[in-house]
Image: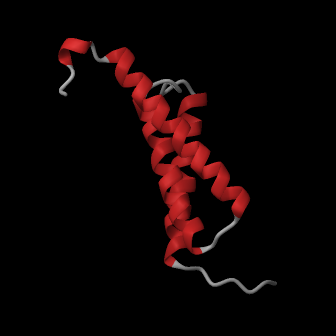
Amino acid sequence: MFDYDYTWSDFVGNIGVVILLTSYYLNVAGKIDSKGWQYNLANLIVAVLLGINLYYKPNISSIIIEAVWFIIAAYGLVRYYKIKVPDNERNY
């Protein structure tokens, strides 16, 4: 049908896809909060894993999406940390 070499970076990217779909389902099912650390950490991991795949098989549109996805997920984690952890309990 078509010729495709499945590589280790494809496997890494597919792990990211599984994490993405699982976290999305858990969010929709009300099991995790989209503003919580679990959802944002999952999205950060997904961006890294798919970024690894894109490093070896570049696609500029997907690279842009994953870079922005990473930034938003990192922002969500920082925001969660600032809201949930009082100033006096932070380890600077």
Residue that extends furthest to the right in the rendered view of this protein: 1
Q: Is residue 21 visible?
A: no
**Where is 41 relative to 57, above or below?**
above
Q: Quadrant where the N terminus lies?
A: bottom right
Q: Foreground: 44 or 8? A: 44
Q: Quadrant where the C terminus lies?
A: top left
Q: Foreground: 1 or 46? A: 46
**Where is 53 relative to 24, above or below?**
below
Residue that extends furthest to the front in the rendered view of this protein: 92
What residue is rendered at 66% in x and 49% in y? Answer: 65
Tell whether 91 sits left or right of 7: left
Question: Could you tell me residue 70's position as x and y percent?
Answer: 52, 45
Give the tally of numbered discs: 0
Tell whether 60 sits left or right of 82: right
Q: How is the image coloured?
A: secondary structure
What residue is rendered at 21% in x and 22% in y? Answer: 90
Question: Could you tell me residue 29's position as x and y percent?
Answer: 57, 28
What residue is rendered at 54% in x and 60% in y? Answer: 51
Q: Foreground: 14 or 67? A: 67
Question: Could you tell me residue 76's position as x and y percent?
Answer: 48, 29
**Where is 29 relative to 56, above or below?**
above
In the figure, residue 4 lies in which quadrant?
A: bottom right
Q: Is residue 87 visible?
A: yes
**Where is 15 relative to 46, above or below?**
below
What residue is rendered at 55% in x and 59% in y? Answer: 50
